[in-house]
Amino acid sequence: MLKIWSGPERGPFSLDDLHGNRRDLRAFAGKVVLVHFFATWCEPCVSEMASLQRLATMVREKPFAILAVDVAEVDLRVRAFFERQPVDFTVVLDRDRAVSKSWDVAALPTTFVLGTDLAPKFFIEGDLDWSRPDVLAAIESLYPAANRPQGQTISSK
Amino acid sequence: MQRREFLKGTAVLSLAAALPGAASAEVVFAPRPGAWRAVDLVTKITIEKPDGKMQAWIPLPSVTASEWIRNGETTWTGNIASATRVRDPKYGAEMLHVTWKEREAAPVLEVTSRIEVRDRAVDLSKPGKVAPLSNAERELNLEGTALIPVDGIVKQTSDKIVAAANARSDIEKARAIYDWVVENTVRVAATRGCGVGDVAAMLKTGNLGGKCADLNALFVGLARAAGVPARDVYGIRVIPSRFGYKSLGAGSANVTRAQHCRAEVFLEGFGWVPADPADVRKVMLEEPPTNLAISDPKVIAARKTLFGAWEGNWVAYNTAHDVALPGSTHPRLGFLMYPQAERASLLLDCNDPDNFKYALTAKEVKPG
C-alpha cells in the first residue's frame, strides 16, 4: 500500500541510463515522478516491471514520468534484461549504490512518488500493482490542477 | 607423521560409509589439523562476443596462514597482450590482471594455482600464547566497509545480542553472535551467487535470508560492532567433504559455482578462529533429505564444529572488501571471489559463468 511520505527531502541525482547518457532527476521537474529502485535478480521487481509499464501506457498523456533505478548490477546484465522485456520509461544505473544509500533504500523494490516539485509524496517498500484504481487516483492527485480529474483530492488516510 | 594422519582421516570416511544407519545417530564431523591435501585449481576464461577493450581479473589464493594453507605456484597461458600479478594495497588480496588486444578474435585465458590445505580446529577450552594483533590489523578487522557498517542498526543489533547473552569476554560475544546468526537467518536457494552481503539492509528490512556472503558478512559485522576483530574469508570449495556432508564440499571436479566465503574471529589466547554459521544453515537447507530441523543430529554436529573448526576441503582467496579492479572504471566490488572481466569496457556478469564464460576445475594432486 502506498504510504504518505513524512520523511525528509531526498536529494537530486544524476545517473547514466542504459545507453550511457547522463539523466538528471531535476530535468523531470514539473512532472509527477515515480522513482523506482529495483534489481533484476529481485523476483518481485521483475513482475512489478510489467505493472509499471502498464501504468506508463495508461498515463502517457499526463505530466508523469517513471525513473527506474537499477541498484548495483553490471550494465550488461541490466541491458540484457530490458532487451528481453522492453519498457517505455527511463532506466538508470546506480552502479555504486550511492543514490540508493543516500535515499536510504533498504529493500528492493522501493518506490517514491514525487510531486511536481520533486519532493517525495508517497512511498512504498515492496511491490505493488501500479494499475490499480486507488493507486492511479493517488498519482493523479499530484498532477497540476489542470491535469487533475475533477473532484480528485489527496487523502492522508 | 603425515602418512599416519592421512590414514586417520580415511578411517573416518570408511566408518561412515560402512555404517550409514549409524551416521544419523552419531554424526562425525571432526576436522583436525593433520595431513595436507593439494589441489590444482584451474580458472578458464573465454570472452564471448569479443568487442573493444577487453581485460580480466582472476582472484588468486593469497591468504597467509601457514598453519592451514600453503599457496604454491600460479601459472597462466592464453592469447593475452599483458598479464600482471596485482596486490590490493589494503588487504593484500592478489589477482591476475590480464588484457587482450582489441581485435583479438577469441580471447582466452587459463590460470592454474597449486594450493595445499588442511583442516583447522582450535581447542577453545585451552587458551595459549598467541601473538596479539598489531594495531593496524586490529583496526582493519574492526572497521566498517561499504556493505558492512559497524554503527547504526548493526551496532544496535550487536549490543542486543551481547546483552541478551550476558556475554562479557570476546569469546562469549563471538559465540553469542554465531548462535544468533545460526538461529535467526535462513539460507535462500534463489539468491544469486553467494549473495550481496548488504548487512545493514538485511537488518533494516528484517530479511535475514541469503547465502554465505550475506550470512557470514552479518556475523562479521555484528562481531566487529561488538569490538571483536573478525573477517570474511572468500574462497571456493575444491574437494568433497570426507565427513559425508554433501552440502559442505565440492560436488565434482567442476567447481565453477562452488565459491564460498567463511569467516574468522580473532580471540585472545587462540588467534584467528574459524567460524561458518552460513554453512550450518546450508546443512539445514541442503543436506539430504533436505530441510533439516535445527535439532537434527547433522545440524547439531555442524553447528558445534563450525565455531572453532573447518574442513580443509576449501581454498581461501582473500579477506578483502571494497576491491578496486585496476584499469577499470567500474565501482569497487564488495568482495573478490569470482573471476571478473570487461568487454568494451563493460563488466561482465560474474554470476553468469555460462555467458561470461568461465569455468573452474579442481583436481586433487599429491602434496609437496
Image: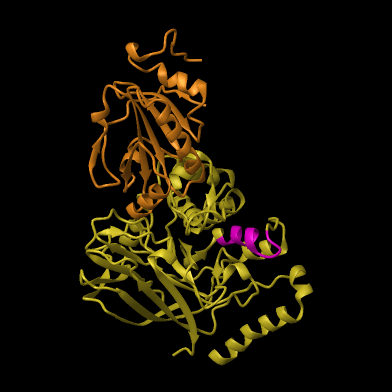
Magenta highlight range: B279-290
- Viewer-proximal residue, B59 or A17? A17
Residue extending farthest to the right is B21
Residue found at x 57% / y 73%: B251
Side of B316 where B11 appears, left or right: right
Let me know if residue B282 is in the magenta part.
yes
- Viewer-proximal residue, B358 or A85? A85
**Quadrant in the rendering for residue B179:** bottom right
* Total tally of numbered discs in the picture: 0
Q: Give the image location of residue B16, x and y in percent.
A: 71, 78
Q: Is residue A45 above or below residue B20?
A: above
Q: Give the image location of residue B268, x and y in percent.
A: 46, 63
In the picture, one chain is yellow; tell me its letter. Answer: B
Residue found at x 29% / y 67%: B50
**Quadrant in the rendering for residue A6:** top left
In the picture, one chain is orange; tell me its letter. Answer: A
Q: Give the image location of residue B72, x and y in percent.
A: 37, 83
Is any atom of residue B214 visible in this view? yes
- How is this picture coloured? by chain
Q: Give the image location of residue B307, x and y in percent.
A: 56, 63
Is any atom of residue B131 visible in this view? no
